Image: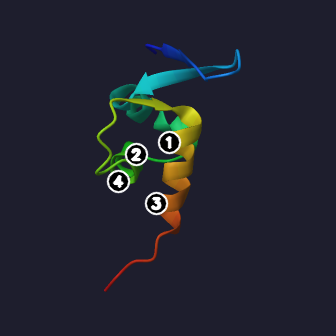
Amino acid sequence: MKQSKTQTSNTSDEIVMYDKEELMVNSRELFDCAPEVIVGALQGDSETMYAIAHVNQAVQNFLQRKVHE
């Protein structure tokens, strides 16, 4: 997977960023969900690169949303 590293300010911790397509291809291994869930979880987000922790939180929020009838 392609990676982009960014450093957080004031620390030496690096956050590894991945593009949406790579996260979708590996969604079952990383998030235990179908690629379509990644699409729904990130819908409306204009970012091009994502940290795994950010996507994991977005997936959990997406899966816990109530369905409106």
* Residue at x-position 48% and y-position 37%: 27
Q: In this view, does 31 lie above or below 48?
A: below
State the SS at label 2: helix
Closer to the camera in the image, 41 or 47: 47
**Mark 4, residue position:** 40
- Badge 3: residue crowd in 10 Å (few <14, some 14–19, many ≥20): some
Q: Mark 3 points at which residue?
A: 62
Q: Residue at position x 34%, y 35% from top?
A: 47
Q: Residue 38, labelled with which disc?
A: 2
Question: Picture coordinates of residue 39 (x, y %)?
Answer: 33, 47
Q: How many marks?
A: 4
Specify the quadrant of the image occupied by residue 32: top right
Left or right of 52 on screen, residue 4: left
Which residue type carries mark 4? Answer: Gly
Mark 4 and 3 residues: CB-CB less than 8 Å, in contact? yes
- In primary-sequence order, the first of circles 4 and 3 is 4
Q: Residues within 10 Å of mark 1 (few under 14, many from 20)?
A: many
Q: Is mark 4 on a helix, strand or loop?
A: helix
Tag 2 and tag 3, C-beta contact below 8 Å: no
Tell whether label 2 touches label 1 (CB within 8 Å).
yes
Tell which circle, 3 or 1, labels the residue nearer the N-terminal end: 1
Task: Specify the color scheme.
Answer: rainbow
When the figure is inspected, residue 49 is found, relative to residue 41, above or below; the finding is above
Q: Earlier in the sequence, mark 1 or mark 4?
A: 4
Proximity of marks 2 and 4: CB atoms separated by less than 8 Å: yes
